Image (cartoon, rainbow, N blue to C red):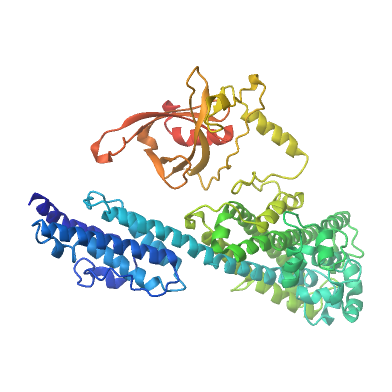
């Protein structure tokens, strides 16, 4: 009787809790009366789905049906044992209503070929929050309600992973970024040819889009000889020989510009490269049937030097900008060309590779490369802002020298842009930067959306490898060419999966490697207990014993943001004899939201110990060789926070390097120096 009264007393609280959780996670106004509606009474324990599309959803449905069948059978036994009334209680008690609520959705979606991410994530969150209330749903059977919900939650997590793999939102956003970038760069190039120059040959060109300008480029160094138009080449011959024209021609002739604007042909050229090779000018040229010309950056540097020295006879600049008073305008012109060249490289060489990742692996792949993608997007955003800023200043100079002067009836210095040139230049800058709905605004918004959709918060699991696209990305991101385009402020990128960290491919690599080896050397005497089951086979890596310094083969961590750290480490314990330390097992560590998580041995999703950093970390000391000693207060097995009981536990962890150990140490003792 006491048990029955206890369950009756819990019922209102159970219903209220379930109602609040459903309202929190499921955006459906019709569910506002879940606690009192008659729609969630017990239904058949048959699957009710003839043919399914989503394996994990139908598996979760089977788990719920098995729970109800087992619960019904136990109720029948209790009736035979004179515990009357139990069967009727199970028809619409809170547990039954929650199960039926989940079953209704699973039956509907299991046969649906397209299940939305937000929908799956909502039901994942609902199941996870139900697990936070064991006191409301005490276990009475081997297959308990919470155990069943945990199994359903696991299947929903797997389903979410599949949804992310199939979702190509990031691919669509990357495609939009590329499309908007083409629009933006095409108008930037048009403006450089028209606004501050006297290249009146452009009046004869029907279009100034980059794919049309290719037709008029000179034969020498032409990126796509098959597209050359002799008539247009003759028309633009003198324009391309000028300093301004040669700058634009050099940018248009780069393999990255071809990759960005040519489309499928460029993709085919990229795909024909062996896996893991970086893109060089000559390699892409050969793959696409191109004849490489002089490097664009050399042409930009040469024109900058000529402008600084006042060698302007063949500049192609309008007369007003050849005077000594417009030296800053000439610098602005070259700066715009330089930034546009860098932008062409970043888009045509790097972003297209990220697009390949998202095209082949869906959002899951793009999220997996987020530690590389997000710093790149920051740099890309900065480049776009710089081009915009330089263009606005250059446009102010052009407007003052020619547009406003003409409008006021004043005298303008010759040679001057034609009326058609000025009109086309104004249309270009208005579309790109100064208008109401500009390319630059749309581009920056698309970059922000891509960054948000590729957030690691959307990733429920970790994937080991990304294939050839990531190999190609790594080659590009470690190249000196990439570093030359992005500058020294670009951060060192972390490793992905089991790959080493991303560094620059130059002469400093050997020194860096030696420095890492030195950092791994430890004054501790270490033994690896995972090397063999026999003590006789345990190999000491003590340097005095003649072994090489230890280089831990662990995955380098990814710091997502300040206050959130992840690392894979070895846990060290004392050897049976003496003071030596040996590796005992592998653990994953996480600091997030002011809490310190120690995962179970070999697991990346099952937490063994969870500690509040402010109240649960008694001491934390950094040792030699990337080690960290910790004393924490944790809950004993089987205890809850309400019990008010903790036990003291000491750990020694070996990190892959001292820098990472220092980062964890800083987070664990922040604002509490007495713990150190």
Indicate the quadrant where residue 656 lies.
Answer: top right
In this orientation, which residue lies closer to the viewer: 26 or 334? Answer: 26
Total numbered circles: 0
Query: Where in the figure is residue 486, as x and y percent of width and height?
Result: 70, 52
In this orientation, which residue lies closer to the viewer: 140 or 445? Answer: 140
Q: Is residue 25 visible?
A: no
Query: Where in the figure is residue 132, as x and y percent of width and height?
Result: 30, 51
Q: Is residue 178 visible?
A: yes
Residue at 49% across, 53% down: 461
In this orientation, which residue lies closer to the viewer: 452 or 303? Answer: 452
Residue at 44% across, 66% down: 55
Residue at 61% across, 22% down: 542
Q: Residue 388 vs residue 586: left or right?
A: right
Query: Where in the figure is residue 392, as x and y percent of width and height?
Result: 68, 64
Q: Is residue 448 above or below residue 574?
A: below
Indicate the quadrant where residue 418 lies.
Answer: bottom right
Indicate the quadrant where residue 200 lies.
Answer: bottom right
Q: Residue 359 vs residue 182: left or right?
A: left
For the C terminus, which image quadrant? Answer: top left
Q: Residue 594 vs residue 384: left or right?
A: left
In this orientation, which residue lies closer to the viewer: 269 or 534? Answer: 534
Query: Where in the figure is residue 660, as x and y percent of width and height?
Result: 55, 36
Q: Is residue 110 above or below residue 24?
A: below
């Amino acid at each position: 009787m006491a048990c029955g009264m206890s369950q009756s007393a819990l019922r209102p609280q159970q219903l209220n809790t379930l109602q609040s959780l459903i309202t929190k996670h499921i955006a459906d106004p019709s569910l506002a009366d879940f606690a009192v509606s008659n729609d969630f009474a017990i239904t058949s324990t048959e699957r009710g789905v003839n043919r399914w599309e989503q394996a994990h959803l139908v598996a979760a449905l089977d788990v719920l049906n098995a729970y109800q069948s087992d619960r019904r059978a136990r109720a029948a036994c209790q009736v035979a044992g004179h515990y009357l009334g139990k069967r009727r209680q199970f028809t619409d008690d809170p547990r039954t209503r929650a199960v039926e609520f989940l079953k209704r959705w699973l039956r509907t979606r299991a046969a649906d070929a397209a299940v939305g991410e937000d929908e799956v994530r909502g039901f994942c969150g609902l199941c996870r929050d139900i697990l936070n209330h064991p006191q409301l749903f005490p276990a009475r059977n081997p297959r308990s309600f919470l155990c069943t919900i945990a199994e359903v939650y696991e299947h929903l997590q797997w389903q979410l992973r599949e949804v992310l793999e199939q979702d190509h939102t990031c691919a669509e956003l990357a495609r939009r970024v590329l499309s908007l970038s083409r629009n933006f760069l095409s108008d930037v190039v048009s403006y450089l040819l028209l606004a501050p120059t006297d290249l009146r040959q452009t009046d004869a060109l029907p279009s100034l889009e980059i794919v049309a300008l290719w037709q008029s480029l000179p034969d020498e160094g032409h990126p796509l000889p098959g597209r050359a138009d002799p008539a247009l080449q003759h028309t633009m011959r003198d324009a391309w020989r000028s300093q301004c024209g040669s700058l634009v021609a050099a940018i248009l002739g780069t393999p990255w510009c071809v990759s960005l604007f040519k489309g499928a042909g460029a993709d085919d050229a990229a795909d024909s490269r062996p896996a893991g090779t970086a893109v060089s000018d000559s390699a892409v040229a050969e793959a696409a049937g191109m004849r490489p010309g002089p490097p664009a950056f050399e042409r930009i540097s040469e024109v900058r030097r000529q402008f600084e020295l006042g060698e302007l006879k063949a500049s192609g600049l309008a007369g007003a900008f050849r005077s000594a008073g417009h030296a800053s305008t000439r610098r602005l012109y070259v700066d715009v060309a330089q930034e546009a060249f860098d932008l062409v490289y970043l888009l045509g060489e790097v972003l297209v590779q990220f697009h390949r990742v998202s095209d082949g692996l869906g959002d899951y792949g793009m999220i997996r490369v987020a530690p590389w993608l997000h710093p790149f997007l920051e740099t890309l955003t900065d480049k776009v802002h710089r081009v915009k800023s330089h263009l606005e200043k250059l446009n102010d100079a052009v407007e003052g020298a020619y547009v406003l002067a003409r409008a006021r009836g004043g005298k303008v210095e010759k040679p001057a842009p034609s009326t058609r040139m000025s009109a086309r230049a104004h249309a270009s800058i208005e579309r790109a930067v100064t208008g109401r709905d500009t390319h630059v605004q749309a581009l920056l918004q698309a970059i922000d959306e891509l960054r948000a959709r590729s957030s690691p918060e959307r990733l429920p699991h970790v994937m080991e490898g990304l294939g050839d696209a990531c190999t190609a990305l790594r080659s590009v991101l470690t190249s000196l060419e990439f570093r030359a385009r992005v500058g020294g402020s670009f951060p060192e990128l972390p490793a992905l999966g089991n790959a080493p960290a991303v560094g620059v491919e130059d002469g400093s690599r050997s020194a860096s490697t030696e420095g890492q080896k030195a950092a791994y050397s430890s004054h501790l005497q270490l033994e690896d207990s995972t090397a063999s089951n026999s003590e006789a086979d345990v190999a000491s890596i003590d340097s005095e014993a003649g072994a090489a310094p230890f280089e831990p083969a662990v995955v380098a961590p990814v710091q997502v943001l300040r206050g959130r750290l992840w690392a894979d480490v070895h846990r060290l314990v004392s050897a049976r004899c003496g003071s030596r330390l040996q590796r005992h097992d592998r653990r994953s560590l996480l600091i997030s939201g002011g809490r310190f998580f120690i995962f179970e041995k070999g697991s990346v999703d099952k937490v063994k110990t969870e500690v509040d950093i402010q109240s649960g970390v008694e001491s934390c000391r950094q040792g030699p060789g990337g080690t960290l000693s910790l004393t924490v207060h944790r809950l004993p097995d089987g205890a809850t926070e309400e019990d008010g009981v903790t036990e003291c536990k000491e750990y020694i962890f070996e990190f892959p390097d001292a820098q990472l150990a220092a980062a964890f140490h800083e987070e664990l003792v922040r604002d509490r120096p007495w713990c150190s």
